[in-house]
Image (spheres, rainbow, N blue to C red):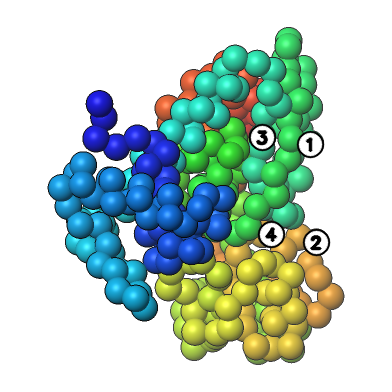
């Protein structure tokens, strides 16, 4: 008999995330006494204590923290395996993830090129935030997508470059540099840059989640930014976009997981590369 079943692992991870048996039982739609018995059974079988429990708190032990880390990976791997198995066995539509407004008008060409392939499947579009498109690809929620290099983490993904563009400084019309033909990164060294939600580091300015919030703050002079040109085209009223040559180019790539060799995903990538690469 296995020391730990998937159902038991899911129960443990839920309790570890909630650190509260009542809330965990609610998430799992099980009775709290049954959940407590399951956790005790796991501890007995593994011969470890996973939680330090008092009448007021539930705290992970070092053994519990280790199981939580590896348990999450195991559950994610199981989810990906099931999704990939189901997709390989039927005509499930492909899911293509993009950032809203972040396709540089490439999407229609990609879809048209793939649609010309014999037996092409329907492609559903998944709009995602600035930072989680790679997560959607890695965990199987999306089959392929458009990412920006060098901004997105491409680790574990296979990519093909579709478009190369320059980066521009996004400034209010009243900015001291607004009349320049080009500027350097050093010209912006004392400016306030925003912090992108979910992205470590960044500037010292307010946190933003999307380009719409950025444009609003740039227009009133609160922040500036340096972005791929396509993300701010067409240029919104009240701002200007000035080339920053030393910022280096940006690449829009079509991406999939390194280990995903399914036929229709390969056809989609190849069709996009032939049409646009």
Crowd around label 1: few <14 · some 14–19 · many ≥20 (10 Å): few
- Image quadrant where residue 206 sits: bottom right
Q: Position of residue 156 (x, y in %)?
A: 40, 39
Residue drawn 55% across the image and 58% down it: 26
- In what quadrant of the picture does the C terminus appear? top right
Q: Nearer the viewer, residue 25 or 33?
A: 33
Residue drawn 73% across the image and 17% down it: 120
In this figure, which residue is indicated by the disc labeled 3? 95
Compared with 32, 257 (above or below) is above
Compared with 213, 255 (above or below) is above
Give the structural element (helix, strand or loop) at label 2. loop
Residue 165 visible in the picture: yes
Tag of residue 234: 2
Cβ atoms under marks 2 and 4 closer than 8 Å: no
Give the structural element (helix, strand or loop) at label 3. strand
Tag of residue 183: none
Of callouts 3 and 4, the N-terminal one: 3
Of callouts 2 and 3, the N-terminal one: 3
Q: In this rendering, which labeled residue sits more in front, label 1 or label 3?
A: 3
**How far separated are the C-alphas under marks 3 and 4?**
22 Å
| Residue at the right extreme of this rendering | 237
Tag of residue 108: 1
Cβ atoms under marks 1 and 2 closer than 8 Å: no
Crowd around label 4: few <14 · some 14–19 · many ≥20 (10 Å): some
In this figure, which residue is indicated by the disc labeled 4? 231
**How far separated are the C-alphas under marks 4 and 1?**
17 Å
Residue 161 visible in the picture: no
């Amino acid at each position: 008999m296995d020391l730990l079943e998937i159902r038991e692992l899911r129960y443990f991870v839920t309790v570890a995330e909630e650190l509260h048996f009542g809330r965990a039982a609610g998430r799992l739609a099980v009775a709290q006494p049954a959940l407590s018995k399951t956790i005790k059974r796991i501890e007995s079988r593994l011969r470890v204590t996973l939680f330090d429990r008092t009448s007021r708190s539930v705290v992970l032990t070092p053994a519990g923290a280790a199981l939580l880390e590896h348990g999450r990976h195991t559950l994610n791997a199981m989810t990906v395996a099931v999704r990939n198995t189901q997709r390989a066995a039927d005509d499930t539509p492909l899911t293509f993830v993009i950032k809203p407004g972040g396709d540089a008008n490439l999407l229609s060409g990609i879809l048209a090129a793939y649609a010309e392939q014999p037996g092409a499947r329907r492609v559903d579009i998944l709009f995602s935030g600035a930072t989680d498109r790679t997560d959607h690809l890695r965990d199987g929620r999306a089959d392929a997508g458009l990412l920006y290099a060098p901004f997105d983490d491409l680790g574990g993904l296979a990519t093909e470059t579709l478009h190369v563009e320059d980066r521009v400084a996004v400034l209010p019309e009243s900015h001291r540099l607004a009349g320049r033909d080009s500027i350097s990164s050093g010209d912006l060294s004392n400016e306030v840059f925003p912090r992108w939600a979910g992205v470590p580091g960044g500037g010292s300015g307010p946190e933003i989640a999307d380009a719409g919030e950025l444009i609003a703050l740039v227009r009133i002079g609160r922040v500036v930014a340096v972005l791929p040109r396509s993300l701010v085209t067409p240029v919104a009223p009240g701002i200007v976009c000035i080339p920053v040559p030393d910022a280096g180019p940006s690449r829009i790539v079509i991406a999939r997981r390194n280990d995903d060799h399914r036929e229709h995903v390969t056809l989609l990538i190849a069709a996009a590369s032939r049409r646009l690469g």
